[in-house]
Image (cartoon, grey):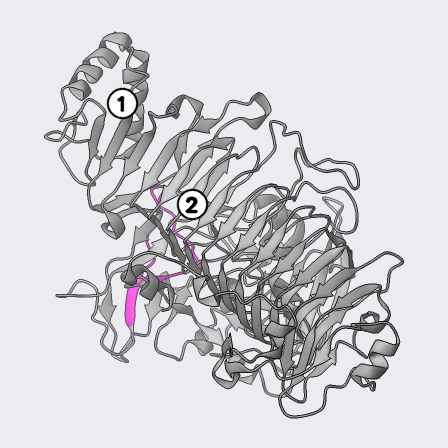
Amino acid sequence: MKNKVFIALTVCLVGAASAGDVYVVPEGAEGGNGTKRQPFTTLSQARDAIRAARQAGHGDEAWTVRLAAGDYFLSGPFVLEPRDSGGDGAPVVYQGEGAETRVMGALRVDGWRATDDGLWEAPIPLLPDGTRAYFESLFVNGRRAVRARHPNAGFFIPQSVKQTLRTNEQTRTEFAVAELTARGEDLAPLAGQPAAAWRYAQVVVHHNWDTTRRMILGFDAASGTLRTQGGRWKPWNPWRTNSLYYVENVRAAFDAPGEWFYDGLAGTILYRPRNGERLPGRWRGAEVFAPRPGLQTLVAIQGDPAATQRVQHVHFRDIAFHYTDSPRRSDQVEKAMIAPDVLGAADRPGPTQFEPMQAAARTEAAVMADGAHAVTFEACDVAHTGEYGIWFRAGCVSNRVIRCALTDLGAGGIRIGDPGGKGASIASNAVVSVFGPYSTAFNEVDNCIITHGGRFHASATAVWIGHASDNRVTHNEIGDHYYTGVSVGWVWGYKGSVAQRNLIAYNRIHTIGQGALGDMGGVYTLGTSFGTRVCNNVIFDVDSYTYGGWGLYPDEGSEGIVFENNLVYNTKDSSFHQHYGRDNIVRNNILAYSRQYQVAITRTEPHRSAVIEGNIIYWAQPGRALGTPRYRGTEKARVEWRRNLWWCVDGPVDFNGKTLAQWQAEGRDTDGQVADPLFVDAAERDFRLRPASPALAAGFVPFDSSEAGVYGDRAWRRRARK
């Protein structure tokens, strides 16, 4: 009987307008067969129909699943397995109709009413099991609303922080109680909250390059002290009295247009509308969505790298993937770390407990792929996520993300490689030449817009490449993130690393850091990276809190990397900063207008740290040429300085108390010079060179910085600059 059903379904499909076309609409009659006249209503039906057709003997055809415009609400991930693969030259294509074809992990929030004080109020949506949905994001007209926040903008700095280690006697699990005491009257507006109201509140702490998000277990208004509970602080990056913090989802902080408040005690959601927003349900009223709780992934590509059974030759085109959730606290952590009297009833979920995690490395993505080969996302839109956008994790080879827009991201945009290191074992100084089943390599991210990220996990990276080689990140617009723009490598020191021969080129990377975190860069590298090239990028407006707003940042053990033809300007600490590394080449770059230092190297090592040659290094006071005294290694490190042109707009060029001649007498930059490079208009950031520039005579090779960023039609390029 089962085979007869498969055959009947296949006949219907073959009778469609094209033998390989399957049609899907978001709302239609039950019992469709996938033809244009009787379309399916879900992606899963289309996938299953293709499986059935192949089982009936139609496995070699190219298939196109045509998704009509509309909203496709998911209750769980859309899963593709190896049996859902296409063939070389005969792919399976999921084709939408652009931004109007929306695959969504969302709950529509209905039942809104206007209150007497000008607010909107709606009941918290119920899940199928009858429990209230818990979520920490809300979207109004496609815009992420601000969760009631104190302060409304910026951060507070604590007066003191304290951690006490304890052990749960029943589970023998160690945990830490942390107390954060406010300065002065910073938290005074929060006094008077009923103790039960803190049940749904959180404190978010930014400490250097990490963030911690915890529920608030108590608040002493007299001392201004918040009490939290979680994991032990990392000794290299604990909370400090110069850390930044803010408080979320407190009723007293619900005071600005565009803010919302999850009132778990009353069972309602409150929203304070912006000017011009109309109440949902009215003519041209607002559209309000919340992420479906627990749905962090919309598309799960589940190949098996261990068995080399990959999902391959599947293409997604012109589809919008919108709305995913952020992670919840697990039951195990809940029972081990949080007292039951604080948690309340078991059916009342609590806020996220998110411990420090560099680059938000283990958060998931709206699209998760393992064992994917020749999978393409083209002209797709990924937005309103709780975590990352797209992640090609283990065993992902030759996949492409082309002309996609990834915006309003809870974490970052795209991740390539597995931070767990499967298949990443390699001898020190070895060159990658053999690829195993877990290897991730040869993936491409080109002509994409990756902006407005870190909205939930501020420490996330816009584009992250971990244990992966031979990938290309080119011609992208990358901006408005609170941590690093592009990060390459996931090995600290000179241990063996498979992150080799990656290309980061022609990207426009800007508005990074924004004073929210420290120790980041426009492009960040980590560990041995033989053959990796960072070239022809334009990097600007990198600003950190405390230290570390760098343009090009080779960190611990970066080795064998070429940084060439990059334009870097308007950074905080330095345009180029190397913590420690070996044999990196910094050549033919324009490094301009760093506020503190221009070039810095932290550590002196016995080997050659870098070759720095043929660069134009340009700044204004009070910036300094070299990163000392803060970074003492700059003068002493084994660096081959060659043919660099140095110029300070409004003062002498001072090599830490030495003139150029004195510095050259020590054997440094003996063929360098101090001279005005004669930019067309550096004050307006036009760094083209005039014909009489001494840099040209010194051998500097001009490059066209306008080639960085996205390409294509005017509308696409205009969208990138919004």
Inspect the image, locate mark 1, and give the three-letter code of the amino acid beneath it: Ala
**Above or below, comparing residue 310 to residue 176 in the picture:** above
Secondary structure that dominates the magenta span:
loop
User: Residue under circle 2?
Assistant: 401
Q: Is residue 195 visible?
A: no
Residue drawn at x 63%, y 87% as measured from the top left: 620
Q: Is residue 678 magenta?
A: no
For numbered disc 2, what is the local secondary structure?
strand
For numbered disc 1, what is the local secondary structure?
helix
- Place residue 159 in its image quadrant: bottom right
Q: Is residue 62 visible?
A: yes
Residue 556: x %, y % from top left: 75, 57
User: Residue under circle 1?
Assistant: 49
- Place residue 634 in its image quadrant: bottom right
Specify the quadrant that holds the N terminus: top left
Residue drawn at x 22%, y 76% as measured from the top left: 276
Residue nearer the viewer, 87 or 117: 87
Residue 600: x %, y % from top left: 74, 71
Q: Is residue 367 left or right of residue 615?
A: left
State the extent of the magenta-drawn residues as a range. Answer: 120-139
Residue 507: x %, y % from top left: 49, 59
Label 2 Cα neighbours within 10 Å, binned few <14 / some 14-19 / many ≥20:
many
Q: Is residue 132 magenta?
A: yes
